[in-house]
Amino acid sequence: MTVRAYRPVSWQLPNATMPGVGTLQALRAEALTCTRCPLAEGRTQVVFGIGDEAADLMLVGEGPGRQEDLRGEPFVGRSGQLLDTLLRQELGMGREACYIANVVKCRPPGNRDPLPAEIAACRPYLQAQIELIRPVVVVSLGNFATRLLLDTTEGITRLRGTVHRFGPGWLVPTYHPAAALRGGTEVLAGMRADLVRAKRYLSVDPPAGDGPDR
Ligand code: SF4
């Protein structure tokens, strides 16, 4: 297991174009009427994020699916049920103890992958969420969240099993739960191991610590 160096995130807080993002409530209000990208046209509602606004653990997925679009909450379908189960079994916590958000806040039509322009348009919201919550550990779920947050083109299969310094804390990449549903026991076992790793890093103080496995 490897601890990799923190990569500075080059994103800028969207203060110039999103006045009043000093709180999550203000940011949510801004997002709920957002038309920054074409995904606004097909959504039922914006899926901003949910959970404890002072959470030590933040989970970042890809984007809302059909169920999420209808309910306005991330990870409420089969993937969400698996995620809830893994959170309970491997971290001993429910989703209410975390904060859960996505790379894009509106559902891509037909559950297609979000396009680069859509990710770029939406990332100030995610950046601001991370800045405001300041979690100790961010778990990126799947390729889109991991590539965006680590500013890399590497895939999740190569990146999982590593820990990265990230802002004031850590980032632990793992599979998206949908991949675990499709991928069988090996993918699921990898995801479990990553969540155990995330739990361990909740009690590691960066930047002084290099992590328990280094
Ligand atoms: S996906 Fe993000 S940027 Fe695009 S309309 Fe929705 S909230 Fe705005």
Image (spheres, helix red, strand yellow):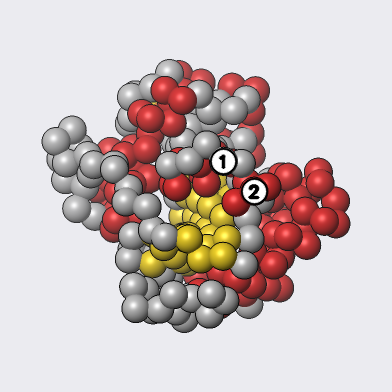
Label 2: which secondary element: helix
Q: What is the x, y in percent for residue 201?
A: 50, 74
Residue at coordinates 73% horizontally, 60% vertically from top-left?
A: 190
Q: Residue at 48% of width from left, 41% of height from top?
A: 152
Amino acid on which the number 2 mark rests in the picture: Arg
Tell me: 114 left or right of 5.
Answer: right
The location of residue 205, given as percent across then percent down, is 38, 79
Residue 164 visible somewhere in the drawing: yes
Marking on residue 154? 1
Picture coordinates of residue 31, whole percent (x, y): 33, 37
Pointer 1 local density, CA inside 10 Å: few below 14, some 14–19, many at least 20 = few
Q: Is mark 2 within 8 Å of ligand 1?
A: no
Query: Which three-letter amino acid code belongs to the residue tagged 1?
Result: Glu
Q: Residue at x 60, y 71 (%)?
A: 197
Number of numbered discs visible in the structure rendering: 2
Q: In which image quadrant can residue 19 be found?
A: top left
Proximity of marks 2 and 1: CB atoms separated by less than 8 Å? yes
Q: Is residue 180 left or right of residue 17?
A: right
Q: Position of residue 181 (x, y in %)?
A: 79, 48
Secondary structure of residue under mark 1: loop
Query: Mark 2 to mark 1: distance in Å?
Result: 7 Å
Residue sitting nearer the eye, 46 or 1: 1
State the residue at coordinates (42%, 60%): 5
- Checking the image for residue 158, the label placed there is 2
Using a 10 Å C-alpha cutoff, classify the residue at mark 2 as few (fewer than 14 neighbours), some (14 to 19) or many (20 or more): few
Whether 133 is drawn above or below 49: the answer is below
Is 25 placed above or below 136 here? above
Q: Is residue 213 left or right of residue 207?
A: right
Residue reaching furthest to the right = 185
Q: Quadrant of residue 196?
A: bottom right
Is residue 62 visible in the rendered structure shown here?
no
- The disc at residue 7 is none
